[in-house]
Amino acid sequence: MFSGLWYSLKKAVVQIFRNKGMSIASLFSITAMLLILALFFAFTVNVNYLTEQVKDEFNTIVLFLYDDATTEDAYKIATSIESMEQVDSVKYVSKETAMEEFKHSWGDNAYLLDSLAENPLPNSLRVELADIQGGSLVAQVAYGFSSVEDVRFYREEVDKVLKISSVIQKSALVVIVFLVIVSVMVVSNTVKLTVLARQEEIEIMKYIGATNWFVRGPMFVEGMLIGLISALIALGIASILYVKLEAGLQVDMMTLFATTLVDSKFVIINFAWIFVALGVSIGACGSIISMRKFLKV
Amino acid sequence: MIDFKNVTKVYGEKVVLKDANLHIDDGEFVFIVGPTGAGKSTLIKLISREIEPDEGDIVVDGKVIDDLSNREIPPFRRQIGMVFQDFRLLPNLTVSENVAFAKEVVHSSKKTIKRMVPQLLAMVDIEDLSDKFPDEISGGEQQRVAIARAIANNPKYIIADEPTGNLDGETAWAIMDLLDQINKRGTTVVMVTHASEIVEKMRKRVITIQSGRIISDVKPGGSTDV
């Protein structure tokens, strides 16, 4: 078994060098595919990341309480809502605290609020959601309490963001699947040309009594090696580009979305395993598919 | 032993072999002759299990080879050494690598290969060509390499398809000598040929095929039985 693998590896390396033209053609096509793939992957990951950020920001629901509600009422509501699995935590904000915060947000103009005879802000409960999808359910439950005057949450905005990001994710997935299929086809065609050139050789091997795997082994390994090398080249290029992009966009991203791009370390690690797995399997599939026909001697 | 029992092979509408019966004993030397398109190549392809008969059975060493599974075909072929008109050497391997390849296919150890290949080359008288590539040597020499490869795994049968077809007279006779020697050591040789001069002089069994039928089978003694 091991000697068979070694035999295949040796033959494969020799073949790659003897068929330089074909090897380079396959190498370029796989690398190009992986790079386009990288573009979509980086885009999708960042859209997801942005969505998460938005979710975090909008995952607070505020329950406004009637003025006649007692602290005990508030406490009761808080405990029952906190027990819901969609809820992370509940915090009571008295009208005095709310006014403080309000004044704070007005900054230097806060003195204008001093003239108010009476604090118009209600007592409230701030609910942090564990799962943003549960927002409407929590709102519904909250309306059930007689002490709750109003509920404020960003349902529509959040829904919109979620919808957009899911459309982006789905279309990216379609594009990625399409790209993988195309690259398997491109590689199998490239390998087919190599195999065509070696058709006679394969026939001779079969006449001598070589098993299919004895013929296929070296070509299979050859495909995988080309895939692996392409993956490493693509990884290098994609990583350098992403790091540059991250550095270049940092300021713009911060002002526009109050966040940065996804950390390059995370993206590069993912590039690495995706590329290697895809490159190697594209190479392997390509050679298997293209050889099937010629082994029937 | 090779037995054809009522074997028929049809390609589309064309019957290339019709109800053929044949028995070849171990150690025999058999010529198969007949005009082009008579069904000689079909016969050889049937023996090497490249194709399967539409009717009838082909039995090699007591085993019906039509029943061989894909997995059993490679081991079966290793007991048959094939020699072709166009030599069919691997062009990017040297002479000794070509012969060694047949041993690699059966997973011989490196040591065995190193020891056996020079012996095989010596048997066919080309030990001095071992590092040449096929396109650097003559046709007769290439056929010698092919024969060395064919006998590398000590096969029971040599199937030769017009082995002298591309060679001039003198070279052809040298190849025939070689095949005769191999036969004398006990290997069964089945040879398809057009060369009537060779067939006459060799005085071996001759099977004649015409239009897909075996029309005569003459043993060296002269008796005919079909």
Image (spheres, coloured by chain):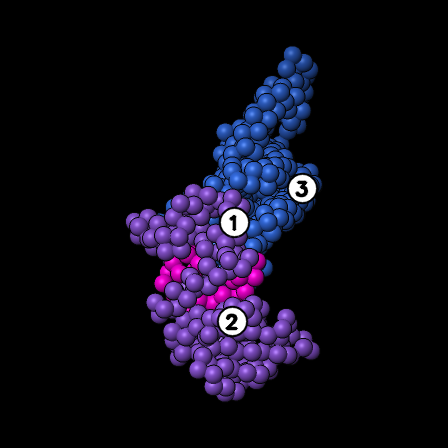
Marking on residue A237: none
Location of residue B69 in the rendering, given as x and y in whole percent from the top left corner: 46, 71
Q: Which mark is residue A168?
A: 3
Residue A238 shows in the view:
yes
Task: Using a 10 Å C-alpha cutoff, classify the residue at mark 1 as few (fewer than 14 neighbours), some (14 to 19) or many (20 or more).
Answer: few
Chain in blue colour:
A
Task: From the image, tell me which residue sits under label 2.
Answer: B199
Residue B34, placed above or below residue A9: below
Give residue A51's quadrant in the image: top right
Tell me the chain of label 1.
B
Q: Which mark is residue B138?
A: 1
Instruction: Give me the residue at 56% from left, 55% from top.
Output: A200
Q: Chain of mark 2?
A: B
Depth check: give the residue in front, A67 or B215. B215
A197 or B200, which is in the foreground? B200
State the image quarter where residue B150 is shown.
bottom left
Residues at badges 1 and 3 in contact (C-beta under 8 Å)? no
Q: Residues within 10 Å of mark 3 (few under 14, many from 20)?
A: some
> In which chain is the residue bearing label 3?
A
Label 2 SS: helix
Q: Is residue A281 visible?
A: no
Q: Colour of chain B?
A: purple
Q: Amino acid at mark 2?
A: Val
Q: Please tell me whether residue A82 is drawn above or below residue B173 in the rendered image.
A: above
